[in-house]
């Protein structure tokens, strides 16, 4: 679905139902043939399009992977070619995706885009800290329960906050971004609805949590609920003018 939206922003329309159906059917066929990996549409449609890639590029890639896998060449290539040699193209695609997020959305929505990126940055920082602790030979349950997290906090590394903010970063980014957009557009009822959805998702651990459960992070869920109530109150009782995308301000309705 993210890829469909990304392609739409790049000027290419694909029916979401057809894309999801094809993706699921191909994955099921692969499973029946013993493939443990699901099929996935690779992110970065605008980047591949800018590089000149079309359907022929995808077809040629698929055929080449079949040939290389059949003759066992992929294992040899992975042993010879370092991973860092492949990273630049991924970095290039990531830069294009990030640029597209700001270029193809209304300019006044830029703060919402930045807000939506914060959970992913927190998740990335958490992964780095986890890797550093693992390299140091520290067991994570002991780290969580011990004094190390407190010492990190005293030195400005808010590990627990990063962990909570980065939990379920994809959903968190979508919800925060939507709230930001609707607040910017003064559509406070819609913003309140997304905040309420955030409260429900957070309570059950889909957002701001390491695992699905009940009351995973109740404080954060209550915060979303409070924001939802506040935004609903603003929409219900506040006389706030509506901001049009042109930048003009329309008078509130009588």
Image (spheres, helix red, strand yellow):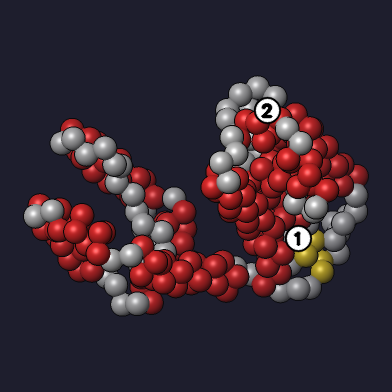
Residue 200, image x and y in percent? 67, 31
Q: Is residue 221 above or below residue 162?
A: above
Indicate left or right for 168 with 185 as reference. Answer: left
SS at mark 1 in the image: helix
Q: Residue at x 65, y 62 (%)?
A: 113
Where in the figure is residue 96, as x and y percent of width and height? 48, 72
Q: Earlier in the sequence, mark 2 or mark 1?
A: 1
* Label 2 environment density (alpha carbons within 10 Å; few <14, some 14–19, many ≥20): some
The C terminus, quarter of image: bottom right
Q: Is 220 left or right of 103, judged from the image as shown?
A: right
Residue under label 2? 216
Query: Residue 180 is drawn in which quadrant?
Result: bottom right
Question: Dot 2: what SS?
Answer: loop
Mark-to-mark CA distance, 2 and 1: 30 Å
Position in image of residue 127 (x %, y %): 57, 49
Q: Nearer the viewer, mark 2 or mark 1?
A: 2
**Numbered circle sitting on residue 165:** none
- Judge from the rendering whether residue 248 lies leftward or rightward of residue 99; answer left or right: right
Q: Which residue is mark 1?
A: 184
Tell me the quarter of the picture where residue 53 sits.
Answer: bottom left
Q: Quadrant of residue 159?
A: top right
Depth check: 186 or 5 in front? 5
Residue 179 in sight: yes
The structure residue drawn at horizontal position 29% and vertical position 41%, both measured from the top left corner, is 37
């Amino acid at each position: 679905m993210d890829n469909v939206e990304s392609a739409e922003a790049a000027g290419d329309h694909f029916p979401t139902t057809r894309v999801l159906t094809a993706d699921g059917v191909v994955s099921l066929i692969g499973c029946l043939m013993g493939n443990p990996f699901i099929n996935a549409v690779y992110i970065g449609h605008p980047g591949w399009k800018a590089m000149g890639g079309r359907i022929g590029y995808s077809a040629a890639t698929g055929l080449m992977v079949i040939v290389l896998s059949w003759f066992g060449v992929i294992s040899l290539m992975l042993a010879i070619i370092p991973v860092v040699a492949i990273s630049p193209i991924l970095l290039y695609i990531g830069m294009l995706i990030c640029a597209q997020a700001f270029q193809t959305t209304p300019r006044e929505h830029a703060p919402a885009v930045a807000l939506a990126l914060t959970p992913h940055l927190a998740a990335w920082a958490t992964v780095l800290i986890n890797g550093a602790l693992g390299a140091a030979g520290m067991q994570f349950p002991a780290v969580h329960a011990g004094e190390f997290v407190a010492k990190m906090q005293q030195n400005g590394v808010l590990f627990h906050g990063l962990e909570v903010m980065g939990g379920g970063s994809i959903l968190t980014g979508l919800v925060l971004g939507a709230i930001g957009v609707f607040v910017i557009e003064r559509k406070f009822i819609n913003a309140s609805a997304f905040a309420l959805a955030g409260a429900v998702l957070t309570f059950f651990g889909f957002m701001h949590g390491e695992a699905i459960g009940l009351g995973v992070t109740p404080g954060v869920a209550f915060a979303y609920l409070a924001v939802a109530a506040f935004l609903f109150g603003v929409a219900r009782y506040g006389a706030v003018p509506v901001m049009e995308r042109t930048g003009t301000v329309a008078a509130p309705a009588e």
